[in-house]
Amino acid sequence: MHETFRRTASGDVRFKYPEPMSWHNKAKHWVDNHNQWRHAPIDLAEIWKMQWWPHCQFSFFLSISEVNEATSRGRARGVIADPVLTFRKKLAIKLMENTLNSEGRTMSPSSRLLRSRESFLVEHSLDVQPAYSGKWTGNSWSKTKQKHQKLYCRATAGCTNRIRTYCVCNKRVPMCQSCHITHVTTL
């Protein structure tokens, strides 16, 4: 219980709230503060124009996590919280470097499929390197003296097939047919 007062014409009247009312008055601003911090300085829901329900939920939980992190560090630990944008950058990096699979187990970085950002925008089909070409350099094939240069499959760790094929989604990664099947089915 906490003591408070009320000013009246006859003077200040002191009284104590019952315990539930005391708790309510002590914490009623937390929801307002939470919403204010969630919308400032950049409101994800406003900036990230989305209509797909899972994306809306993700942005809501992301902003809730930001505020919870700030309040827990600020109140519980007595530490100054990171600014929201700094926290977002750190969280974004952690999400991009995520090594958890769908079962929640940690994968080794070498067992993940190598895939470029553009890979989600194109169809996946196995194609053959042009003659007299080696590795993809980013905008063209490197030239070789050998007509049919074979490379080791690099799509998954442990594959030792020597091939001339690649998936059209990422020319940088030589890929055998069995790894290509795995690549397409794990999208």
Image: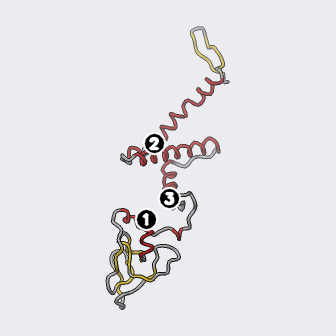
Q: Position of residue 121 (x, y in %)?
A: 34, 62
Q: Quadrant of the N terminus?
A: top right
Q: Secondary structure at mark 3?
A: helix
**Vertical arrangement, residue 9 with respect to residue 90, above or below:** above
Q: Position of residue 21 (x, y in %)?
A: 61, 23
Amino acid type indicated by mark 3: Ile
Q: Earlier in the sequence, mark 1 or mark 3?
A: 3
C-beta proximity under 8 Å, tags 3 and 2? no
Task: Give the alpha-carbon distance from disc 1 to disc 2, as whole Å.
Answer: 40 Å
How would you rate the neighbour count of disc 2 (Cα within 10 Å): few for under 14, some for 14-19, many for 20 or more?
few
Q: Residue 114: which quarter of the image? A: bottom left
The residue tagged 3 is 93
Residue count near mark 1 (Cα–Cα under 10 Å), binned few <14, some 14–19, many ≥20? few
Color theme of the render: secondary structure
Closer-to-camera residue (35/185)? 185
**Residue lying at the far top of the rendered structure:** 10
Label 2 sits on a secondary structure element that is: loop
Identify which amino acid the numbered label 1 is placed on: Thr
Please state which amino acid type lies under the numbered disc 2: Ala
In this view, the residue in front, 65 or 71, is 65
Q: CA distance from mark 3 to mark 2?
A: 21 Å
The C terminus - image quarter: bottom left
* Residue 7, picture quadrant: top right
Q: Which residue in the protein does label 1 denote?
A: 185
**Front residue of this view, candidates 175 and 58:** 175
Nearer to us of marks 1 and 3 is: 1
Q: Tell me, yes or no, whether the two marked residues, 1 and 3, touch with CB atoms within 8 Å.
A: no
Q: Which residue shows up at 34% across the image and 76% down it?
A: 127
Residue 159 image position (x, y, % from top left): 50, 77
Q: Residue at x 48, y 38 (%)?
A: 36
Residue 40 is tagged as 2
